[in-house]
Image: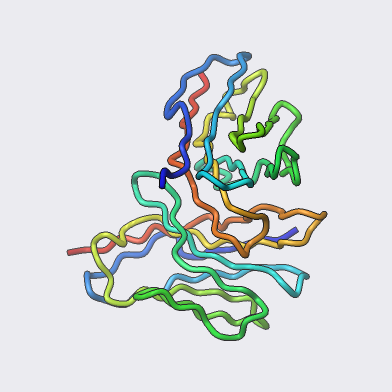
Amino acid sequence: KAGVTQTPRYLIKTRGQQVTLSCSPISGHRSVSWYQQTPGQGLQFLFEYFSETQRNKGNFPGRFSGRQFSNSRSEMNVSTLELGDSALYLCASSSGMGGNTEAFFGQGTRLTVV
Amino acid sequence: AQTVTQSQPEMSVQEAETVTLSCTYDTSESNYYLFWYKQPPSRQMILVIRQEAYKQQNATENRFSVNFQKAAKSFSLKISDSQLGDTAMYFCAFMNPYSGGGADGLTFGKGTHLIIQP
């Protein structure tokens, strides 16, 4: 069974640009969550999608958005990039919502904003 | 909002020793989930162990076990017979599954860097 796939693995962007990251969940999983990991703030929850609907959102500005497609693949978009957006972005998929189902993480996308 | 605190930024033990990682959390909820995740240098987060707050019995997974003290809001991870492959960042995490009709997502601690020395 293939794991969670995140693409691209590495990305370098310039301030002011926008970026789209992709996450393909494990087959059959309908929930996809996104997290930002930085040395200063640690791991922070961005948002969760379930069956193409955003179910919850963390405390991030509106520049961070996402969506989920009918095949459960998810994308997150960051517009008007700032230096502080440099981070490892992790995606996790699970078969359901809540803590009673295990979340499987991808290897992340390392975004560097210069 | 929930907070998760890991007070040990780094720990180092010899191979085969037992090590305990500390975690405390703060919540007003009565039912929730607690997790320990491992993040090796590959950066992929791996679930080590999960505890449901309404279950009094401490969770165990092979060499990994937890000491869950609900009243004290403490959730420590014990690794027995530590191995070189256990070297990684370990994150304690909290989830309230019922907030706002959907999960809040995981709230993570800052992590403990565990180094297993040969």
Q: Position of residue B48 (x, y in %)?
A: 44, 64
**Image quadrant for the C terminus of chain B?**
bottom left
Measured along the vertical axis of the image, is residue A113 above or below residue B2?
A: above
Q: In the displayed structure, does residue B9 sit left or right of residue A91? A: left
Which residue occupies the foreground of this view, A93 or B1?
Answer: A93
Residue at 66% from the left image edge and 34% from the top image edge: A70
Measured along the vertical axis of the image, is residue A104 above or below residue A91?
A: below
Q: In the displayed structure, does residue A56 sit left or right of residue B39? A: right
* Total residue callouts: 0
Q: Residue furthest left?
A: B118
Measured along the vertical axis of the image, is residue A26 above or below residue A9?
A: below
Q: In the displayed structure, does residue B78 sit left or right of residue A18? A: left
Q: Position of residue A80 (x, y in %)?
A: 67, 18
Q: How is the image coloured?
A: rainbow
Q: Residue furthest right?
A: B100
Q: Position of residue B88 (x, y in %)?
A: 36, 56
Which residue occupies the foreground of this view, B55 or A36?
Answer: B55
Q: In the displayed structure, does residue B19 sit left or right of residue A85? A: left
Q: Position of residue A91 (x, y in %)?
A: 54, 41
Residue at 61% from the left image edge and 14% from the top image edge: A17
Indicate the quadrant where residue B29 lies. Answer: bottom right
Indicate the quadrant where residue A72 lies. Answer: top right
**Image quadrant for the N terminus of chain B?**
bottom right
Residue at 73% from the left image edge and 68% from the top image edge: B27
